[in-house]
Amino acid sequence: MNECQLALTTPLAGRLRAARLAAGLTGRGVCARTGIDPGNLCRMEQGRRVPSLAILLQLAEAYGITVAGLIEAAATAGPDAPETLSPHLPVASYVAAPDPGFRQEHERHWQGRPDLRENARRFALDVFEPVQAILGVGLRVESGYRSPSLDRMIGGEQAPFSAHTHGLAADVTPVGMTAVETLPILRAAVRRGALEHLDFATVEASRWLHIQAAPGALPARQVVAQALAC
């Protein structure tokens, strides 16, 4: 399957890709509904081709949203806008830390680790944006990227792999609903194939929804309710 996997280059490009993923469609699926060539769609999602209004109308109908909803994030982004991973996830929110020392460490990692930036953009476009679109509410990031030292301080010595330290996960609070209320919605989405890149989603500390992308090519697509002690 020839899917578009390049990083976000324009706000509209990121929005086009996020909307397609939220609708659970591949490039071939979009072609079947609209006749738009998958290669042309990929170039639009890379920011290398600007779609016409006629194409935007076709895509909006295929994704089940309005044209305004498809381009609203792009329309508000100016040249001085903060750096973003995706239309609704600013870099500053993703690399934030509760302590100034950790914030400086995170910013240093962000500048020095291309793998971290690539992973974070993949997580934002393939998991964060589709989850937010499916839930229909904003997602406030409580903890995104965590350096190994901060991850140990928060979670202790746990599994050898932490998706947070690789830029592949975030703990989020859904605005206007509880984390537990999101689980049946996400399970239903997984069953209909709308979250093909979700690796894992669960409730943590009774309040936060943990979502992550897979480190490799085969996401587990698991949505589970974590057992919490009283």
Image (cartoon, rainbow, N blue to C red):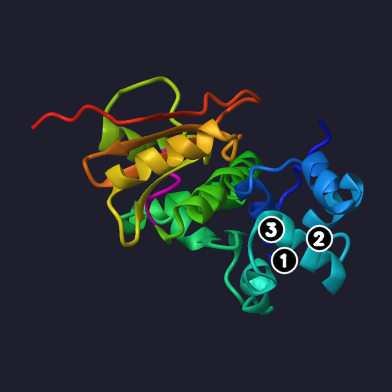
Instruction: Mark yes or no: residue 83 visible.
Output: yes
Residue 53 at x, y percent in the picture:
83, 73
Label 1–label 3 contact, CB within 8 A: yes
Say what amino acid the circle numbered 3 marks: Gly
**Callout 1: SS:** helix
Frontmost residue, 116 versus 63: 63
Marks 2 and 1, the one that precedes in the sequence: 1
Marks 2 and 3, the one that precedes in the sequence: 3
Circle on res. 47: 2
* Left or right of 197 in this view: 67: right
Say what amino acid the circle numbered 1 marks: Leu
What residue did someone put label 3 on? 14
Crowding at mark 2 (Cα within 10 Å: few <14, some 14-19, many 20+): many
Q: Which residues are magenta?
A: 140-147
Q: Residue at 30% across / 38% down in the picture?
A: 203
Instruction: Mark yes or no: residue 52 visible.
Output: no
- Whether residue 12 is in magenta: the answer is no
What residue did someone put label 1 on? 12
The answer to whether residue 6 is above or below residue 2 is: below
Say what amino acid the circle numbered 2 marks: Gly
Residue 141 at x, y percent in the picture:
39, 55
Q: CA distance from mark 2 to mark 1?
A: 8 Å
Crowding at mark 3 (Cα within 10 Å: few <14, some 14-19, many 20+): many
Q: Residue at 42% across / 43% down in the picture?
A: 185
Q: CA distance from mark 2 to mark 3?
A: 8 Å
Q: CA distance from mark 1 to mark 3?
A: 5 Å
Frontmost residue, 19 versus 205: 19
The N terminus - image quarter:
top right
The C terminus - image quarter:
top left
Label 2–label 1 contact, CB within 8 A: yes
Q: Residue at 57% across / 46% down in the picture?
A: 120
Frontmost residue, 112 versus 206: 206
